[in-house]
Amino acid sequence: MTHYITRRSFLKLSAAAAGTLAIGQLLPPMVAQAATDAGLLNAHGDGYIPSMCEMCVWRCGLIAKVKDGRVVKLDGNPDHPHSKGHLCVRGQSGVMNTYDPDRVLDPLIRVGQRGEGKFRIASWDEALDLTANKMLAIKDTYGPEAMVFSSTHNLSQPQFENILYAFGSPNYGTQRSLCFNAMIVANLMTYGMEEPERIYDDQLEYVILTGRNLMEAISTSETSALSDGIARGMKVVYLDPRFTKTAAKATEWLPIKPGTDLAFHLALLNVIVTEDLYNHSFVNDYTVGFEHLAQEIETYTPEWAAPITEISAETIRRIAREFAAAAPHALAHNGWRTSNFINSFHTQRAITILNTLVGNWNVALRASGGESSSALGAPPQPPYPRSSAQRLDGVPSRYPVVPLKLGVFQELRESILSGEPYQAHGWFISRQNPVMSLPDRARTLAAFEKMDFIATVDIIMNDTAWFSDVVLPEASYLERYDPLSPVGDRVFLRQPVIEPQGNAKSALWIYKQLGERLGLGDYFQYEDEEDYIRQQLAPLGVTLEEVRSKGYAELPPADDPGFEWNTPSGKIEIYSETLANVNFPAVPTWQAPPEPPQGQFYLLTGKVAQSTQFGTQNNQLLHKYSDEPRLWINNNIAAERNLADGDWVEVTSEVGQVHIHLQVTPAIRPDCVYLPPGYGHLSKGLTTAFGIGASDSVLHVTYSDPISGSQALSQTFVTVRKA
Ligand SMILES: Nc1nc2c(c(=O)[nH]1)N[C@H]1C(S)=C(S)[C@@H](COP(=O)(O)OP(=O)(O)OC[C@H]3O[C@@H](n4cnc5c(=O)[nH]c(N)nc54)[C@H](O)[C@@H]3O)O[C@H]1N2
Ligand SMILES: Nc1nc2c(c(=O)[nH]1)N[C@H]1C(S)=C(S)[C@@H](COP(=O)(O)OP(=O)(O)OC[C@H]3O[C@@H](n4cnc5c(=O)[nH]c(N)nc54)[C@H](O)[C@@H]3O)O[C@H]1N2
Ligand code: SF4
Ligand SMILES: [Mo]
């Protein structure tokens, strides 16, 4: 049967699915039993079941209301430290993630040309056999390294990683270099840890947010802590070329010139050192290299930074003094998506050092208790085979300080295109949409053309699945188990609150089945999903049955490392010998980023509260809350250029062109434009989202920060003219 995905055939498919639902979607029996025993479900099987949200990577605790075998409402679980009883608008709309009429509910095998959208429905056996055979053929002909794997952070990533490392490929693309490499690598070089936890206690008085738009780019716990802090008078300084919702809540909005945050922070360091406002005993006892910094920043005065940042010297000096006066109850937030410019690594290092100089460790920042997961069990498995092949993304040869698990995804794509140092032939993708998230979409599609085989695991026909040869449909987060999720001193359970629709399956099942077909069964020593979780829970002495009704189990408290850092010196490294050894500046130093030529604009990206990346625009509930995405342009510039609100414009960068309606607003600097992300889909299998807006990935030029490998997402310059 040829399944040509058009709106009509999707509707036909979904009508068939709805037919099966109408005669009674089932609750998973063991889950329903536990909820009934705990008094959460009534005799008809209606009531409440705890689980976890997956509308973004934050994984808040939820309580699903089920009625007649269907999920009808989602609320926050008050016991979860992230959500504390609340779900954001995306979390509350998660019902339509499961009941999206565009869900892929059967394995699909491509029958037309790539990108044509012609697929036929296949059985799991056929789709998995085909996938395994193609992967093994590539391995036999070119070696395991010719298979590339990529996935974005999720709970079944350990099973995904088992497939790739046991298969023997070193080529692993994650979203991290498009997201937070600069921040993570800077933290590793300074504190020897990926990300210290930020403490928002009642004492915090002063926060500097560098492009961290917490009111829209949501992390529930931090977003609500920020609101609470503002309500009790905490001062918030917010740097962003756009007036975002966080700017609206901040005490002070500084519309900094893009790419110059480094100059701003270097000048803060200059004032704090030259005016002797730093914490001498903390610096003496717990840091190395202060004198190198003091020397480097001598010339970085507020007067030097003012014309660069377009923030006055008085303002910079005042903020430095206020920050130091509030210390240690002061926090310079190191951001999350810190992939803006090729100097973002130094910006991040400057921020870590600003925190260090005022000695806010264990007051505003502390070691994160991330290692509590080591208290969990896991099925036994053999060690991975050693891969002698070079990684295609240039880690560590060209990126010596980037950890392997971070990688440099956009460089991996470049190597596929160049065929150097060797040619990749296959790509296995899960829970990721590189067609949209990598810069320069045309190059990503060209890289796909070089592939003999592409397989994608997703819940909908995302743009990457649209260009794949096989699509393996995962059950949605309300329909499946995942490995446990440790958060602080608890471990949370994702459990199915309804049975999967159609033939969708959990990732735990999919990877085990694929692993066995690849001859890697030893890496998947669990009977089924419940057995896997039982093995995880075993050392805690609690049963899965006990965890089901509460949704979590307690973990033994993690050790508090206090004032110990996992750096070569055991101290906070203001000067990093590790960086010096590979010929990178060992203390932050000014690097001017490129600026747009006359008449062009910086193209900015930034999250919106009602969608997650590129994966939720097709959600029919969220769609209702979303305005048409338009290109923001400053009102004075629009007037100068005779452009009006709503005009249809042509936006052109050196690599691509899009067309979009204009939004004329004073809420953006005159030298910038902003395109809300997540639209401009290529997949016609997304019938709600297709045809709306434009994708900035068409315009983004590929630039990697040479130290952290972060893609510089604000470093694309565009022209705008009436179309
Ligand atoms: N609702 C929602 N929440 C999310 C997500 C989502 O998709 N939707 N995604 C999650 C993820 S994966 C991430 S990484 C985080 C990201 O959260 P954030 O770190 O806040 O990142 P963005 O929203 O991408 O960008 C923040 C701001 O940076 C500004 N900006 C651009 N260039 C510069 C510059 O040079 N300097 C300064 N100071 N600002 C600049 C942009 O105008 C934008 O407003 O959000 C998380 N939370
Ligand atoms: N232009 C531009 N590019 C960017 C950014 C930007 O703001 N603008 N942001 C950058 C950042 S911060 C990040 S983190 C990356 C994100 O980049 P990606 O990770 O590539 O993008 P997502 O849209 O988050 O991809 C997640 C995919 O998971 C699918 N999915 C959802 N639920 C499930 C599930 O239960 N199972 C499975 N198997 N799949 C599921 C969704 O349908 C979606 O296709 O993009 C980066 N690139
Ligand atoms: S922040 Fe929102 S979308 Fe993300 S897990 Fe929490 S409720 Fe879900
Ligand atoms: Mo991200």
Image (cartoon, rainbow, N blue to C red):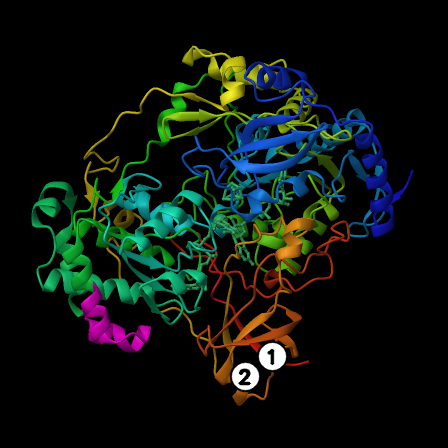
Residue at (38, 72) in percent of width and height? 257
Residue type, numbered disc 1: Asp
- SS for callout 1: loop
The quarter holding residue 292 reads bottom left
Residue type, numbered disc 2: Ala
Looking at the picture, tell me which residue is in the foreground, 252 or 647. Answer: 252
Q: Would residue 46 be visible to someone looking at this image?
A: yes
Where residue 135 sits in the image (x, y, percent)? 69, 32
Q: Which numbered disc, 1 or 2, marks the residue that appears first in the sequence? A: 2
Q: Is residue 169 above or below residue 671?
A: above
Residue under pointer 2: 638
Residue under pointer 1: 645
Where residue 158 sits in the image (x, y, percent)? 52, 28
Residue at (40, 25) in percent of width and height? 490
**From the Cβ of disc 1, is ligand 1 less than 8 Å away?**
no
Left or right relative to 578: residue 81 = right
Where residue 573 sits in the image (x, y, percent)? 21, 45
Looking at the picture, tell me which residue is in the foreground, 549 or 392. Answer: 549
Query: Which-is-in-front pick, marks 1 and 2?
Result: 1
Where residue 53 sits in the image (x, y, percent)? 55, 36
Which SS type dominates the magenta stretch? helix
Q: Is residue 127 magenta?
A: no
Q: What is the spatial separation of the Cα atoms under label 1 and label 2, in whole angstroms?
A: 8 Å
